[in-house]
Amino acid sequence: MKVFRLDDLDAERAANQGAYLRFLREPHMSAGLYALQAGQSDPQQPHEQDEVYVVVSGRASITVGEETTTVARGSVVYVPARTPHRFHHISEDLRVLVVFSPPEP
């Protein structure tokens, strides 16, 4: 069993001065913590993997393909592989748990 605490992961991510911290990589999936500050731009490009976002805290809009919605704590978003997507209009600092399948490289 592996157990992680979001506060510890966020501290490690911040200490490494990055928006993303991958904390788990297994043969069929990987997981990370993604953080964007209020007003920040999301620079990500489409991925080769399916992914699921679980919003841990914050508030923003997300566009996946041609659809846009508002997300906040508790929102879960599925993004199919190779689909353009990005967070925008980030009004509260955003922390998002990200699960990729298959695992990201």
Image (cartoon, grey):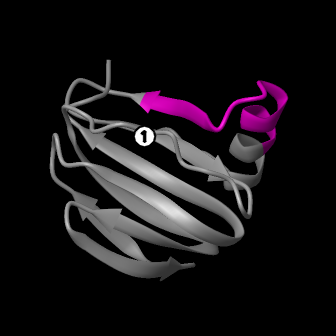
Looking at the image, residue 4 sits to the left or right of residue 86; the answer is: right
> Is residue 14 in the magenta section?
yes
Q: Which residues are magenta?
A: 11-24
Quarter of the image with the N terminus in it: top left
The answer to whether residue 95 shows anywhere in this view is: yes
Please name the residue shown 69% across and 30% down the image: 18
Looking at the image, residue 12 sits to the left or right of residue 81; the answer is: right
Question: Which residue is label 1 attached to?
Answer: 31
Please name the residue shown 34% across and 66% down the image: 63
Q: Where residue 49 appears, x then y in whole percent?
A: 20, 36
Quarter of the image with the C terminus in it: top left
Splitting the image into 4 quarters, where does residue 103 fall?
A: top left
Of 34 and 60, the residue lying toward us: 60
Q: Where residue 68 appears, x then y in whole percent?
A: 33, 75
Q: Amino acid at mark 1?
A: Ala
How dense is the environment of label 1, judged by Cα within 10 Å: few (below 14), some, or many (20 and up)? many
